[in-house]
Structures are given as C-alpha cells and as structure tokens.
Amino acid sequence: MKNYYTILGINKNANDLDIKRAYRKLALKYHPDRNINNVEKYEKKFKKISEAYNVLINKKKRKYYDKYGHSNQNEVPFNNFNDIFEEIFPKFSDYTEYSEDDEYEYVNEEEIYGKTSVKNKFPGKYGKNITLDVYLSLKDILTGLYQKVYIERKILYKYLEYINCEKCLGKGYKLRKKKSFFLNFQTTYTCSLCKGYGKYVNTFLKDMDWRGIVSKWENVNIRIPVGSIDGTILKLHNKGHQAPLTGHVGSLLINIKECTNLNYKRINKNLYIKIKISLMESIIGCIKVINYFDREHIYIYIYPNINENDFIYIKNKGIPYFINNNYKFGDLYIKVLINYK
C-alpha cells in the first residue's frame, strides 16, 4: 500500500498549505525535464509525487484514503500529472528548468526579455572603498597636518570555513528557460541563497553576517600633505572594507573640504586679502602689518598716491603645490581699500 504522506514527507495532520509546499519542493526537484540524464527514473518518482498530491489535496479523496488505506481512483477521475504541475506552477508551466526558491516568486516580463537577464559577475571580488570628508582651514592647507580619524570597517573574520551553495552549485546564479511558439528564451538570475557569491559561511558567529563579515571601529592616522586644497582626494591603501571570499581590502579615500576663512580668500594657488587705509595714508604712503595665519607678520609698504582697489603683490606667499618633484608656491595679493571719511 502506498503511503502518500510519506511520499510527500508530511504528517497526517498536514493542512492544504503544507501539502502544496511539500509538492512544490518535490516536484521541482524530481521533474523529468530537470533530470534529462535519467528521465525514466525521475518520471516514475514524479508520478508518485503527483499521485500523492492529487489524492491528499482533494478532501473527498483524502477522506476515503484515510479511512480505507487506498485512494479508490476509479471513483474520482485522476488528473493528468502535467495538469497538476501547471495548476501549482501557473507561470512556470512553459519552463524546462525551475528554481526551488520560486515557490512564491514568479517570473515577470522584465526578467524574460532581459532587463535582469544578464549573468551577474561575481559580486564583492574587490573590497569597497571608504570615503571620508576631512575639513581643513587655509592654515592647515599651508602647513599640512597629521590627523587621527575613527572609521567603521567591514572586515572578514579571521577563522572561517566556506561551503559551496547547494542551490546554485557554487555558480552564484541560476538559469531559467522559457519556450514560445517560435523562440526559446534563457535568462539568468542571482541565486537567492548565496546572493551571487556561490559560497556562504558554514558556521555563524556573533555579530557576523552570512558572508563572514564583521564590523570593526578603528583609529587611523592620516598625513595630509601641504597644498591639499578643496576637492583633493588622498588614498590610503588597505584601510577600506574587506571583500568576502577573496579577502581583498579596499582603500580609505580622504576627500578634502576647505573651511571658509574670514580674512583670506583662495583662488587656485593664490591668496587674496583686503586692507583698509586712510585717505592721508593713500596720499603719503605708509607701512601696514598683516597677520599671516599666526605664522608670521608680513610688513606691507603702501606707496604714495595709491588708488582704490589697487593690488600689492607678494611672491611665494600663496598655496604650495608639488610639480616636477619640487614644491612651488602661489602668490599673495593685497587689495587696498581707502577710507575717505
């Protein structure tokens, strides 16, 4: 006597949803179209599964089976096995290859016609970079500095064991095939179990994700060279996130942001500042002193009969920059404003 409950791997108290779930899983696994190397064997297995489902999902048949130990197929006509399969998988009936994770996930038109049909490359081969904004004053840009930053990194746990994904057999993707009247379509999609990696961690530990990645906060000392103006990006190797499987480590990218200075303005490599003098000083000339970023005092000679908005130019007091293996400097321009009161 056939034990339909054993065939589907369920108990006698299973409800309709349990029966459908069990059939979905087994039908996908043993469908002859998925096992073309041994069609005859799997066809017999598939028929047994379908027969068990056909009886247990029908209340009248199930009641009769539970009472007498057989299905009495003569009393209630038995459906074609393919009809049962199409009933359970209405959107998969044209497919010659199926995926077990499609139990509640149906193929849409975008997947069939290629919007998501391109085979995914191996994800996470390289560790991702960390981008950090660092704000500098003009004084910092002139002098350079060492700075300690606190960053969160995603790193690979030291002692890990990976196993091949049994769903995609380590490929990271699965195939779907669809038949139409004239054409056959084949699409690939990322494996939902391993997320395209082809492997996953065998043993999970506290605070570890399924890839074996843990978070770690770390102090990093960075050296910002002189002349690092707004928009400069400094790259610190091996201080980014770490990739699963490969262990490749990304970089820490320092994005320089420049703070506004109330007295000085930077245009490219040159600095600009304004000074005010009286009308008498503009006529007879004078000497003015400016504070150069608390580093030194610069004495400015104002020549007689200077005009409003004239510039006084001081060489090599601008922003340093590196060219031809040497540091060079921009210039400082002092704009003269006359107080006529």
Image: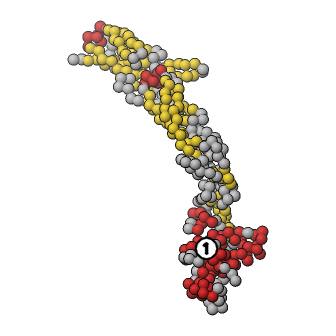
Where's residue 18, x and y in %?
A: 57, 73
Query: In the displayed structure, does residue 40 sit left or right of residue 220?
Result: right
| Res. 25 in view | yes
| Res. 78 in view | no
Residue, x 43% and y 22% (percent of image)? 139
Quadrant assignment, res 31: bottom right
Q: Quadrant of the N terminus?
A: bottom right
Secondary structure of residue under mark 1 = loop
Q: Mark 1 highlights which residue?
A: 10
Query: In the displayed structure, does residue 48 sit left or right of residue 212?
Result: right
In the rendered view, tell whether residue 234 sits above or below residue 23: above
Quadrant assignment, res 61: bottom right
Q: Going by the picture, which residue comes out furthest to the bottom?
A: 75
In the rendered view, tell whether residue 64 sits above or below residue 268: below
Residue, x 57% and y 38% (percent of image)? 240
In the rendered view, tell whether residue 284 sits above or below residue 160: above
Q: Amino acid at mark 1?
A: Ile
